[in-house]
Image (spheres, helix red, strand yellow):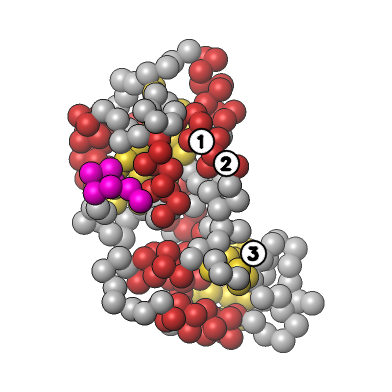
Amino acid sequence: MPSADAASSRAANADGPRVLVIEDDPHLVELLSYNLEAAGFAVATAPDGEEGWLCVLEDPPDLAIVDWMLPELSGIELCRRLRRRKDTRNLPIIMLTARSEEGDRVRGLETGADDYVTKPFSPRELIARIHAVLRRVRPALHGETLTAGDIMLDPVAHKVRRNGREIHLSPTEFRLLRHLMEHPGRVFSREQLLDAVWGLDSDIEIRTVDVHIRRLRKALNAPGEADPIRTVRAAGYAFDLSPTDGPA
């Protein structure tokens, strides 16, 4: 498990997008953390690639900022690892590095980085790039409607529709569905869902997740409709409704 010194606790912006900064320069970490938190992000940090890898597996962020030249495990190899796993292959990654040659940029992007920022950099530009990446891969974080198959979720109006009918959900069920739809195909353990939907400081029991999953399924699924929530034995739950799925 990551040590207490390896990963910082979440910032006070608990409802903001969560950014994991994987960087071994403490001064740069301080600069990034200050500017990201001021921009409304919740920030966690890791000082090397191995700790960053464990942090992603234990508590997946909304986006990772990864230095290329990291101790223990390079940023390039970390990016390869993340892209090889089904549950992390869609994690937005911004590579942050002093390597500015065209060949390095191409290598970073081909390895799986969504964007590539060279040092020295402008914190303001980096934050703009983070927003651009999140708008592309996590539209609900910017108030855009999520659509999967015949299900539509509007995070601003707080409404869900399926096959044209309105689905009435409790606030908790809405947050649960939104979290699952934002990460299609990713398997979340019950503990991870508790952290993401109820919060790290929640005293809710693990079995509460199963209760809300059952309620969510009951609300979403009319007779003949595909169940978008997949139960993974001994692992958790995933949202797997494809654009072509619909009534059987």
Q: Distance between the residues labelled 1 and 2?
A: 6 Å
Q: Residue at x 58, y 81 (%)?
A: 217
Q: Which residue is drawn at 28% across and 43% down?
A: 6
Q: Which span of residues is magenta-colored?
A: 1-8
Q: Position of residue 95 (x, y in %)?
A: 44, 31
Kind of residue indicated by mark 2:
Arg
Label 1: state its secondary structure.
helix
Q: Nearer the viewer, residue 145 or 40?
A: 40
Q: Distance between the residues labelled 1 and 3?
A: 24 Å
Label 2: state its secondary structure.
helix
Q: Where is residue 28 in the image (x, y as percent from the top left)?
A: 24, 30
Say if mark 1 contacts mark 2, CB within 8 Å.
Answer: yes
Kind of residue indicated by mark 1:
Cys
Residue 65, can we see it? no
Q: Which of 144 and 15 is in front in this view?
A: 15
Q: How far apart are marks 2 and 3 (CA)?
A: 18 Å
- Magenta includes 2? yes
Is 78 situated above or below 58? Answer: above
Is 68 situated above or below 80? Answer: above
From the viewer's perspective, tell me whether residue 175 is left or right of residue 120: right
Which numbered disc, 1 or 3, marks the residue closer to the eye? 1
Residue that mark 2 sits on? 83
Q: Position of residue 37 (x, y in %)?
A: 24, 46
Residue that mark 3 sits on? 240
Say if mark 1 contacts mark 3, CB within 8 Å.
Answer: no
Say if mark 2 contacts mark 3, CB within 8 Å.
Answer: no
Kind of residue indicated by mark 3:
Asp
Q: Residue at x 33, y 48 (%)?
A: 2
Which numbered disc, 2 or 3, marks the residue closer to the eye? 2
Q: Could you tell which of marks 1 and 3 lies nearer the N-terminus?
A: 1
**Magenta part, dominant SS:** loop
Label 3: state its secondary structure.
loop
